[in-house]
Amino acid sequence: MNERIAICPGSFDPITLGHLDIINRAAAMFDKIIVVVMENRDKKCSFTPDERRVLIEKSVVGIQNVEVDCYDGLLAEYAAQKGACAIIKGLRAMSDFEYEFQMALTNKKLNPDVETLFLTTKAENMYLSSSMVRLIASMNGDITEFVPPIIHDDIVSRLSKSANKNNGG
Ligand code: PNS
């Protein structure tokens, strides 16, 4: 039987515990998950695509059936290239819904072979976002509760006030 492959796309700037929960749950439902770092043209990212990929690779090291990739192009095309049957997105609140719904419909039009599936976030991650993590870390706040422990120090050393000073920022 064909391998059932699902794509978990996102900006992941950086990956949070909320993303990791969705990836874990998706990995239990499919033979293979490809987490792909993509460009969201509406967002200006702090981490380069390669930095984001490395942070994800470190975070998913314990999950057997997960691969990590970067792609600069259309998600629908990427899913076709990889032979994926599903795109998995996490939904936090109704505020996410309209945007995600529009993307799901567009992706279905561009690639009718792929279904978008939404997983509801855990209640404790409802408020969690990469932008919040970046803001807190850049003001030297504690992000321990929000990011995978293995990448905590990488994020802090990259975004903290002293790191910004050293970068002239
Ligand atoms: O984590 P994000 O920023 O909500 O992820 C959005 C992302 C990167 C998945 C989305 O912007 C995307 O799919 N970008 C790739 C280009 C594309 O296919 N856009 C959708 C066409 S409607």
Image (tube, rainbow, N blue to C red):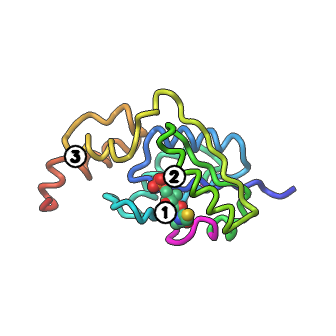
Classed neighbour count for the residue bearing mark 2: other residues with Cα under 10 Å, few (<14), some (14–19), many (≥20): few
Residue bearing the label numbered 2? 99
Q: Is residue 159 magenta?
A: no
Q: Quadrant of the C terminus?
A: bottom left
Residue 10 on image: x %, y % = 50, 55
Q: On residue 138, which mark appears?
A: 3
Q: Is residue 76 magenta?
A: yes
Q: Which sits earlier in the primary sequence, circle 2 or circle 1?
A: 1
Asked which secondary structure carries label 2, the reply is helix
Q: Which sits earlier in the primary sequence, circle 2 or circle 3?
A: 2
Residue bearing the label numbered 1? 38
Q: Amino acid at mark 3?
A: Ser
Write down the region rendered in magenta.
67-77
Asked which secondary structure carries label 1, the reply is strand
Residue projecting furthest to the right? 1
Identify the residue at horizontal 32%, vertical 48% (top origin).
154
Q: Amino acid at mark 1?
A: Met
